[in-house]
Image (cartoon, rainbow, N blue to C red):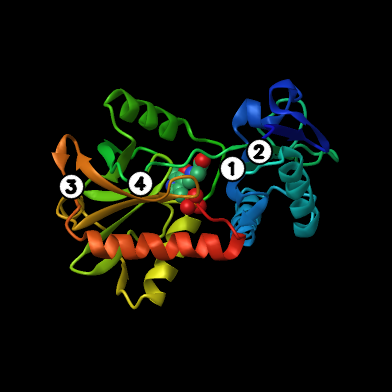
Amino acid sequence: MREIGYYNGKMGNLNEMEIPMQDRALFFGDGVYDVASAWKGTFFALDDHLDRFYRSCSMLEIKFPLTREELKAELQKCLDAAESEEAAAVYWQSSRANCRRSHIFPKGDQKPTLLITVTPMKALDYSIPLKLTDIEDTRFLHCNIKTLNLIPNVLAAQRGEEAGCDEIVFHRGEYMTEGAHSSILILKDGTLIGPVQNEWILPSITRKHIFEAAEELGIPREERNITMDEFKDADEVIVCSTTKICAAADTFNGRPVGMKDRELFRKIQKAYFDRIFRETGWKL
Ligand code: PDD
């Protein structure tokens, strides 16, 4: 497939694209983004991602100029240009404007920008469970907005990599929040449990789908704060996101974690993959 880059209507090969110097994404990270998966040219759950994107824009008072249908058309144009026969990640972001640096919102008619990339999405090998470590969550209280401000996530992901781990588990004191770039759920005594959705965590679309899959399977679900002790004692630890999809973890800080209810985990994971296959026509 071709890797595609797009900025305000101009599309080309990703490595050859450039953006203007005064984009507020560069000065302030003053923008929002979203990432959806596409399977052989067909988006999965695009409407969920668009709902969240427009919600993020409105929470930052970014008046994104394209209608939903116009944005969909631009995303599809980029995806088509990529000629992807595999799984692809379609990333898009909007910054408030391209204008002279000032903390105050621009007063002129500068419009929010649109940047899109289409890149291959590497599939995880689900036969190898993930290794995790923890980091105190010192992020701001806007983690429910998918903003470009990801420095704590970037630093945490790097610390995880240096510790030989696949993902980190953020916690605020004794409470687990989420990963640096994924959601974390647990299974305990046959119940699927996810942390309360508040300003501490991103409203993950994969998590929403996994909860829906569990509901269809008749698996009890709970949304409540999860302590790190509960996390360590979970029957299964599920790490999920648009790009990781639905993976299990078996190691936390070098010690065994989860892997005690394989059957239930596999049932949920299969149901979720089946939904992707059903909605996109994709087959492994
Ligand atoms: N990240 N929490 C955080 C902090 C994330 O960055 C992500 C996804 C998730 C999972 O959200 P979803 O299920 O909607 O993908 C949770 C994306 C993939 C990224 O930033 O690349």
Amino acid carrying label 1: it is Ala
Q: Secondary structure at mark 2?
A: strand
Labels 2 & 1 near each other (Cβ < 8 A): yes
Instruction: Compute the Cα span from label 4 to label 2.
Output: 24 Å
Amino acid carrying label 3: it is Val
Q: Residue at point 74% right, 21% down?
A: 16
Where is residue 239? Give x, y as percent: 35, 49
Instruction: Compute the Cα span from label 2 to label 1.
Output: 6 Å
Where is residue 89? Give x, y as percent: 59, 42
Q: Where residue 89 is drawn, which disc sits there?
A: 1
Compared to 105, does 141 lie above or below? below
Is 284 left or right of 42, judged from the image as shown? left
Mark 3 sits on what residue? 257
**Callout 3: CB less than 8 Å from ligand 1:** no
Mark closer to the chain start, 4 or 2: 2
Instruction: Compute the Cα span from label 3 to label 4.
Output: 16 Å
Q: Secondary structure at mark 3?
A: loop
Q: Nearer the viewer, mark 3 or mark 4?
A: 4
Q: Hey, which quadrant is residue 24 in on the image?
A: top right
Where is residue 61? Give x, y as percent: 67, 50
Q: Secondary structure at mark 4?
A: loop
